[in-house]
């Protein structure tokens, strides 16, 4: 077993500008974001996060409340693999979408305006629009 200390991103990146954050922490994504609250407030980076409702429930987190939390930070929430899914959908609609997906998860884009992201043919590659 290798022990690795958990350090808040705010402590590590306090002096750095961050434009993009990718997290895939098995339903701890919202907690990771809480650990970089000053960075989020200062830089407001676009984020790509995993939204796994089953894992959130196992951790005792309310999946709908996680969507509300992201929005409370000033983010619009969109679904990477379904750009037509309305960013202003209710938190329960996000839960229902993820629950219907294979593996009970979807990837979310958190941004000031997710509609400014232009996705290419592969959903893992995208460029900022004008």
Image (tube, rainbow, N blue to C red):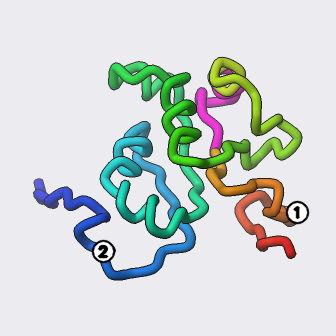
Which residue position is annotated with label 2? 14
Circle nearer the viewer, 1 or 2? 2
Within the magenta stretch, is there residue 5?
A: no
Q: Within 10 Å of the Cα at label 2, are there few (<14), some (14-19), or many (20+) other Cα atoms?
A: some
Residue drawn where x is 19% and y is 56% of the image: 6
Q: Nearer the viewer, residue 102 or 117?
A: 117
Quadrant of the image occupied by residue 119 = bottom right
Tell me which numbered mark, 1 or 2, is placed earlier along the sequence: 2
Is 99 on the left-hand or right-hand side of 19?
Answer: right
Residue drawn where x is 82% and y is 55% of the image: 115
Q: Within 10 Å of the Cα at label 1, are there few (<14), some (14-19), or many (20+) other Cα atoms?
A: few
Estimate the x, y position of residue 76 in percent, counting from the top left.
68, 46
Residue 29: which numbered mark, if any? none
Residue drawn where x is 82% and y is 36% of the image: 85
Quarter of the picture containing the C terminus is bottom right
- Magenta span covers which residues? 97-107
Q: CA distance from mark 1 to mark 2?
A: 35 Å
């Amino acid at each position: 077993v290798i022990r690795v200390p958990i350090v808040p991103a705010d402590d590590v990146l306090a002096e750095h500008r961050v434009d993009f954050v990718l997290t895939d922490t098995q339903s701890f994504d919202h907690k990771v974001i809480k650990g970089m609250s000053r960075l989020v407030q200062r830089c407001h980076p676009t984020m790509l996060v995993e939204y796994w409702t089953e894992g959130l429930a196992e951790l005792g987190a309310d999946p709908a409340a996680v969507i509300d939390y992201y929005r409370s930070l000033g983010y619009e929430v969109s679904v990477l693999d379904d750009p037509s899914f309305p960013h202003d959908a209710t938190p329960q609609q996000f839960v229902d979408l993820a629950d219907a997906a294979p593996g009970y998860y979807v990837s979310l884009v958190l941004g000031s305006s997710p509609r400014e992201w232009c996705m290419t043919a592969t959903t893992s590659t995208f460029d900022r629009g004008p």
